[in-house]
Image (cartoon, helix red, strand yellow):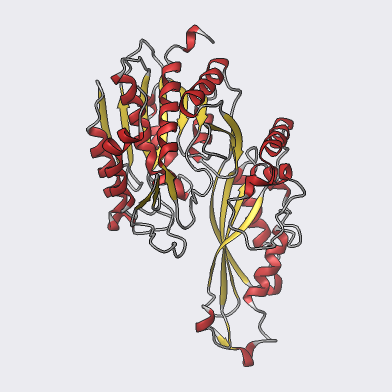
Amino acid sequence: MPLTLADFEEHALETLTQYARLECLSPHFDAHWRENGQIDAAVALLAGWASRRRLRDFSVDVIALAGRTPVLVVTVQATAADDATVVLYGHLDKQPPLGDWSEGLGPYSPVRRGDRLFARGVADDGYSTFSALLALEQLEAADVPHARCVVLIEASEESGSPDLDAYLDHLAEQLGQVELMVCLDSGALTYDRLWVTSSLRGLANVEVTVEVLERGQHSGSASGVVPSSFRVLRQLLQRLEDCDTGRVLLDELHGEIPESARQAAREVAAEFGEALYDDLPVVEGLTLMGDSVAERILNQTWRPTLSVVGMGGIPAPADAGNVLRPATTASLSFRLPPNVDARRAREAVERALTTEVPEGAHVTVSGHHADGWASPDVAPWLSRAIDQASVQAFGQRAGYTAEGGTIPFLASLGRRYPGVQFVATGVLGPNSNAHGIDEMLDLPTCVAVTNAVSDILAAFSTRKDHV
């Protein structure tokens, strides 16, 4: 019997709600995460829930390498005669609240409205532990064979997964012969089918500080003599982006767009049209970038973009005096095409910001990066299994789409296991608001995705019979 919403409410919702109350900010946003203990609390909560699952032969391990965020590893032994391993991936660290949530909602005060649960991290990606293990529990309850499965839940994904490769090295023997990877941290264009991600962009985050003074000076005395740090910053940013079009100017950040990606963009645009962007809360009269829906999809998934996501050294308007400020800091977020080397891209950005700096201002730069990912060709058995799972869980065949976000784990696994098959899916559909205010989890979709994963795992155990 497939999982029902009532089953999820009985076996998972209470613990998921407890998790929602924990801040457990990713290390990039909480430098004192060890002392604050929120990540450890989240790991302990999820490990406790995992240990109570009704599975025949499994183990629950919390692994903490020195100086790194911990990981939760649940190993479920095979009930089918199969030497291969399936890895099911998710993460438990969260983004900050971002801003003021709507009336009655808060980032760490979970609220259920109808079949939607509102709180930071429930959809990105707190649900994943519950979905992965309930999918396996469902198979064993029905005596459906499955391969050996390792559920891997990390705690640094929202910081670009800086700890992940160290754990993949540490767990190499335990992971064994990985042949299928199920990632539960991706998105969905709609809630009416299983959406599978075909590619993800890479990421380069750079923090740049421009200094012109050792301390602030009255603008009546210094302006016109000392160049403004903000003006110098503007000049540097013009090296990176065309301010009229938003096009990124550095060649190292561009990659060739495959014809298959262009065709997929045209097909999605033909099905959904302008409705594809209806959930964006744009101000009235705003003109979207791109000449067509298909071009916007490519902008979002296969072209580099720059977003200034943070500023420092600038007081709030209510606190601003007539002072020439000593320095300005900008946090730059570059999304990169799936086929671009993220390290090379970040180094190109850093060179552009630090070479021949205008007016001799002092510039310091720091940053991190993560590679993008493009799915290998889907094996015939898996293509059939995905479609059948979507029909069973949602009532119609699966959809495939590129995503504009970044999941470093997929690139890491792809490098380590070049023959592995991937299913990257998730619950981040319209109005799920990942990283924004009012993040929400659509509970029926969560249940349907869980059922689809269960069916895909069942199909994997018989894949050799119908390759």
Closer to the camera in the image, 312 or 54:
54
Q: Residue at 74%, 31% (x, y): give it.
A: 259
- Tell me: 287 left or right of 466: right
Which x, y percent locates residue 273?
69, 42
Which x, y percent locates residue 291?
77, 49
Count of number-bearing discs: 0
Residue 322 vertical position relative to residue 333 in the rendered view, above or below: below
The reply to whether residue 62 is in sight is no
Which x, y percent locates residue 101?
44, 62
The reply to whether residue 352 is in sight is yes
Residue 210 vertical position relative to residue 182 in the rendered view, above or below: below
Instruction: Locate residue 450: give its quadrant.
Output: top left
Q: Which residue lies furthest to the bottom in this view?
A: 220
- Tell me: 69 left or right of 459: left
Could you tell me which quadrant the C terminus lies in? top right
Instruction: Locate residue 134: give its quadrant.
Output: top left
Could you tell me which quadrant the N terminus lies in? top left
Q: Residue furthest front?
A: 114
- Tell me: 314 left or right of 237: left
Which x, y percent locates residue 31?
38, 59
Closer to the camera in the image, 24 or 435:
435
Closer to the camera in the image, 293 or 206:
293
Q: Residue at 67%, 48% (x, y): give it.
A: 304
